[in-house]
Each structure stands twice: as structure tokens, then as C-alpha cells.
Amino acid sequence: MNYLAHSFLSFTDGQIVGQFLEDFIRNRDRFSFPKDIQDGITMHRAIDTFTDAHPAIHEAKKVFAPLVRLYAGAFVDVSMDYFVANDMKLHSLKSWKNHSVKVYRVLNENYEYLPENFRSMLEKMEEGDWLYNYRYEKNIGYSMRNVLNKAKYLNTDIPVHEAFLKNKNFLQECYDDFFPDLLEHAKGIHALLQLEN
């Protein structure tokens, strides 16, 4: 899952922070944060583990695997944010906008916990309102290009966005099969974390 899904599958402000931090910190540093932020890190990991094992995600990876092999999961993650952003069963457009504003606010309120590399990204994320704008195909294209640019062993001209557009209906079906299961799983993880507090 990518940034929007991880933020949506957060049940407290601290979990929002932890979900974003997970990809930017060393494992041994996770215990230096307040418990609620640690819970977000745990939630992020649980979401990723569940996602990687889900049959619908295995099917979705087949869209990108011929082009990018082991990086297919990264492009599925970006694709899923498009479908999350357009899922009106989860939120209305106004509620998605409010969600995005809240996430930026929470992250800025916890600025002291953010590593420098994440702080610079947050500024760009908020300026371009990435979370809300994942609903647009062209912005998914930008995100996919960013993945290509960061990948060590991929050419930047691989037509992954074209593959997304060509297979959008199939990827939508994968999302529909997958995301309700993930949502229930995340709720269960949150309940377990609350028992620990």
C-alpha cells in the first residue's frame, strides 16, 4: 500500500505519524518514539505483510511484472492509492479532502519526530496535495515515474503508467477483492494494539 491507504488505515493521530515513518527509519529506532507512533509503525508492517500475501495482489502484480519484475509490488501499491482515492464507499470527495488536510496537519504537529528526508518530502506532498490528488490518472503517472527514478535497476522510460491505464478495469477488480479484507484486518490489528495500551 502507498501513502493514502496507509494514512486511511490509521485510527489515531499517532498511528498516522508511525505509518509514514516506517519507510524512513531504521528498525532499531522504532522504540525511540511514543507508543502511539510505535503502533503506527506496527500497523504499517501488518498492512504490508497482509497485502503481500493476498491473492488479489498477486493477480495485480501480473500487470507490471513483465515490465519491472520484482518491482511489480511497488507499482501495485501506487495503483491501489488511485482506487482508494476514488472509493466513494469509504469517503465522499469532501471527506477525502478533509482527510488529506488532517494528515498534513498531524504530520506537521509531530514535526520533531520526522527524519530530515521525510520532512523535505512532506513539504512537496502538502504543496501538491498528493493524498487528495491520487484520484487523478496523471498524478498516478507522476508517482510511478518517481518509483522508476528511485529504482536502481529500472530504466525510466518503462511504460508502467500505460500498463496501469490499459489494465485499469482489471486492477479495479483486484482492488475490490482486496481492500475490504485489508480494512477488516487493519481494524483487527488496531483492536489488538488497543489491548496492549
Image (tube, rainbow, N blue to C red):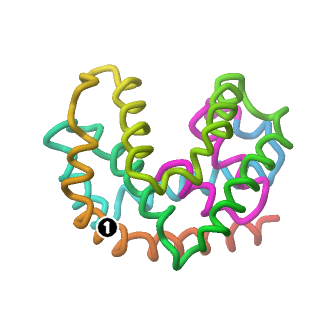
The span shown in magenta is 1-29
Question: Horizontal and vertical percent for residue 160?
Answer: 25, 40
Extreme residue toward the bottom, this view: 89
Q: In this view, does 139 lie to the left or right of 30?
A: left
- Residue 4 lies in what quarter of the image? bottom right
Question: Horizontal and vertical percent for residue 115?
Answer: 72, 27
Q: How many marks?
A: 1
Q: Main secondary structure of the magenta part?
A: helix
Q: Is mark 1 on a helix, strand or loop?
A: helix
Q: Residue at x 63, y 32 (%)?
A: 124
- Residue 169 lies in what quarter of the image? bottom left
Nearer to us in this view, 31 or 55: 55
| Location of mark 1 (residue) | 172
In the picture, which quadrant includes the C terminus?
Answer: bottom right
Q: What residue type is labelled 1?
A: Gln
Question: Horizontal and vertical percent for residue 88?
Answer: 52, 75
Say whether residue 4 is magenta. yes
Q: In this view, does 19 lie to the left or right of 70?
A: right
Question: Horizontal and vertical percent for residue 18?
Answer: 69, 47
Above or below, 96 relative to 1: below
Q: Which residue is drawn at 31% across and 60% down?
A: 57
- Mark 1 residue crowding within 10 angstroms, few (<14) / some (14–19) / many (20+): some
Q: Which residue is drawn at 80% across and 35% down?
A: 113
Nearer to us in this view, 32 or 107: 107
Extreme residue toward the left, this view: 66
Nearer to us in this view, 145 or 147: 145
Q: Is residue 29 left or right of residue 142?
A: right
Above or below, 71 relative to 83: above
- Residue 75 lies in what quarter of the image? top left
Say whether residue 110 is magenta. no
Q: Which residue is drawn at 52% across and 79% down?
A: 89
